[in-house]
Image (cartoon, helix red, strand yellow):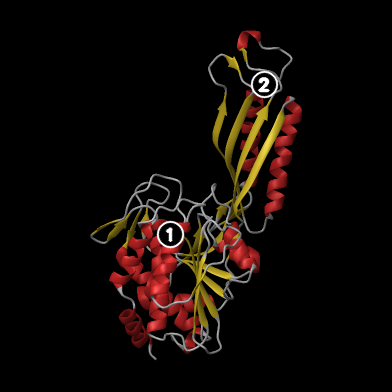
Amino acid sequence: MSTAGLVTRVRGAVQRERLLDTAIKLCEVYSPTGDAGAVSDRLAEILTADGFVVERPDGGWPKSPAVVTRYDSGRPGRTLQFDGHLDTVHLPFVPPVVAGDRLTGSGSSDMKAGVAAAVEALRAIRDAELIPGGAILFSAHDLHEAPWGDGSQLDRLIADGIVGDAVLIPEYLATELAIIGRGQATWRVAFRRSGAPVHEVYRPLDEPSVIAAGAALVARLEQYDAKLSASSDPLAGRESVFIGQVHSGEIYNQYPQECWLEGTRRWLPERKRADAERDFRALVDEIARERGVTAEVRFMLVRDAFKLPLEDPLLPAFDAAVAAIHGKPLPRGGKRFVDDGSSFWQGRKIAAITHGPTGGGAHTLEEWISIDSLVRVAETYSLVAAGYCHGAVDERIS
């Protein structure tokens, strides 16, 4: 079938109102990270009503079992996975509202509407019989958003073999194809002294200052960040250590017992996450010894670094589909945020492309998504499947 004929077939199968209705139904359910069970149930009900057989593996988090379904052509070929998260950051709930081309509300951009677009692509692929071989695996899960989630549910699903040969993730990245991204961890350091709280005029002069230790860490991390800047990628950016919070004391003239700092550490794919953590802890321990205080360090992995295998057959299928829908392939770029693509690459070296609708306001009370772009994502995913699952991309889209 010609490219134009296939695009016409896809556009006839993708239904805008059905897609929007699915997005609204998902956004109606409050689902903070760690407590996405109700919206997972809602999604399972939608898929079951559409005639799909739904599985509910708990992935180590039975409070919010994941949602998994498959569409199999019954013939040999590759399996393309659509994967998304259903949890949202811990902010007050904002109900969904449609105004013109925009859907607003909690989770609309991050990323329930994107999940709905993937569901619509799944329907279109089945209804229009777009893949003459291979299969589609759809998965949705909880525990994505840090610091409340650690990505462990998806990691368990991958370890248990609930994974395709390649993955599309409908996060809100629409204007470029991210081929590399930095890893990220959040860290918290607490310096403490052993003495009791005391007015500053009565403080024992031989007791250490936790604020001085905190100041020393600030200065040392500034130097460390400058050193890390030498490790840089033109697309992903440079390695870094960042301080976002410094706190100490209860009132202005009480000698404090604790000083704590929080921030992030970001690194490139060439560096091992364990090495980044080891070096950070060593730096903190050195300051604690110098200043005579104790140090408690928490180094929490958000996601490891990411690299897209450029030789994978997913790329030509994706480029061809985007060109058919948008007129030209997307430029290559770096992934500014961390997402679940890192889990697939680090765990199994599986190609994972993040491509979703146009939107904004993620992690705020003013999330929004373009409904037109949701339709384009569903169409693009359908075309990628047509080119990828059966075999080489030029067998379907040329």
Q: Residue 156 at x, y = what percent?
A: 62, 63
Residue 223, quarter of the rendered image: top right
Residue 348, quarter of the rendered image: bottom right
Mark 2 and mark 1: Cα distance apart in space:
49 Å
Q: Regarding mark 2 in the picture, which secondary structure is present there?
A: loop
Q: Regarding mark 1 in the picture, which secondary structure is present there?
A: helix
Horizontal arrangement in the rendering, residue 368 relative to residue 151 (left or right):
left
Q: Residue 48 at x, y = what percent?
A: 42, 73
Residue nearest the observer in this picture, 374 or 41: 41
Q: Residue 60 at x, y = what percent?
A: 61, 59
Query: Few, some or many C-alpha atoms within 10 Å of disc 2 (few <14, some 14-19, many ≥20)?
Result: many
The numbered dot on residue 209 is 2
For this orientation, the residue located farthest to the right is 289
Amino acid at circle 2: Ser
Amino acid at circle 1: Val
Residue nearest the observer in this picture, 350 or 194: 194
Residue at image coords 69%, 42%: 280
- In the image, residue 135 sits, relative to residue 370, either above or below, namely below
Residue at image coords 44%, 77%: 52
Residue at image coords 75%, 25%: 292
Q: Quadrant of the C terminus?
A: bottom left
Q: Quadrant of the N terminus?
A: bottom left
- In the image, residue 339 sits, relative to residue 81, either above or below, namely above
Please name which of the two marks, 2 or 1, marks the residue nearer to the observer. Answer: 1
Query: Few, some or many C-alpha atoms within 10 Å of disc 1 (few <14, some 14-19, many ≥20)?
Result: many
Q: Residue 311 at x, y = what percent?
A: 59, 75
The numbered dot on residue 39 is 1
Q: Is residue 322 visible?
A: no
Mark 2–mark 1 CB contact (< 8 Å): no
Horizontal arrangement in the rendering, residue 131 relative to residue 154 (left or right):
left
The numbered dot on residue 342 is none
Q: Is residue 280 visible?
A: yes
